Image: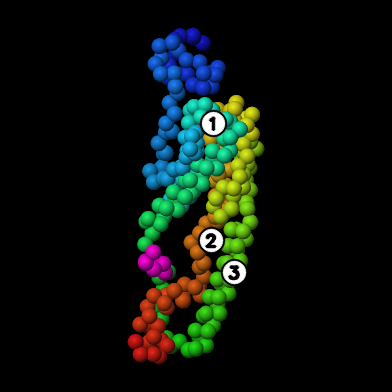
Amino acid sequence: MGFGRRSPDDWDEDDEGDLWLVGSGDPSPRSDPPEPEHADVVTGTDPAGAVTVAATPEAEVVAVTLAEDWKRRIDPRALHSAVVTAANAATAQALARRLETTDLGAAAPQPAAQQDDSPLTRQDVTRLLDAVTADLGAFTQRLSKVVDQPVTAESPGRNVSGSAQRGQVLRLGIDPAWASAARNTEIEAEIKAVLAELRSKSTPQDLAGGPRSRAIDELNALASEPQRLLRRLGLPS
């Protein structure tokens, strides 16, 4: 193996501390986080700029980036707090993005179905409303189990763990000795794994779209066409 002269770009924080070549220019390492690979993402960061968390508008974590000089910006023992701040900031940005792009006046899309113009009796309406009430109660019960109970996660390497509730990270634990010695890429991977699992557990995809059932869809379809509903009830439209 040769020992030729190395370029300044070849040195990083893992090369025997903060060793720099004479004449390499500014001894400060590049601290700007790289651009996220995903085009449509929101980001959150801590006040020191040590950690950046990138997420989709649906708040799914797609990247965790540590500034190359993050150990100069914050103590490794405070890394967990910086990650919590960055992760929750990304979640808040994702919520803001969804609100900006959501048409609150648009009706929810209904599944295609053959138009039904058969008469509706009072008993038909009562049965439908009872079924909708039961379905909404079941959904609320499932949802409360998620939003009221914190969920936990641990990274494969067991160096990072955390808890979350209602899509927000409550606590994150990071082994400071491991964080001080591990490469940034290793730290980023374990943090991302925990944040992604916490997001998945605290916001299940089958509940994210709201309550859905055959009775609820039928009621929504009736409500979306009031004139036809009046005709089916035998009332003047």
Q: Residues within 10 Å of mark 2 (few under 14, many from 20)?
A: some
Residue drawn where x is 60% and y is 62% of the image: 144
> Circle 2 sits on which residue?
207
* Residues at circles 2 and 1 in contact by the CB criterion of under 8 Å: no
How far is the residue under mark 2 from the one under mark 1? 38 Å
Which stretch did the figure color magenta? 104-110
Residue 105 coordinates in the image, percent (x, y): 37, 67
Residue at 54% across, 38% down = 82
Residue 231 position within the rendered picture, expressed as x and y whole percent measured from the top left: 38, 87
Residue in the image at 47% along x and 50% along y: 92
48 in relation to 44, above or below:
above
Structural distance between the alpha carbons of marks 2 and 3: 11 Å
Q: Is residue 103 in view from this perspective?
A: yes
For discs 2 and 1, the disc positioned in front in the rendered view: 1
The correct choice, above or below, for 145 with respect to 157 in the image is: below
Q: Residues within 10 Å of mark 1 (few under 14, many from 20)?
A: some
| Quadrant position of residue 115 | bottom left
Seen in the image, is 143 located left or right of residue 49?
Answer: right
Query: In this image, 43 relative to 166: left or right?
Result: left
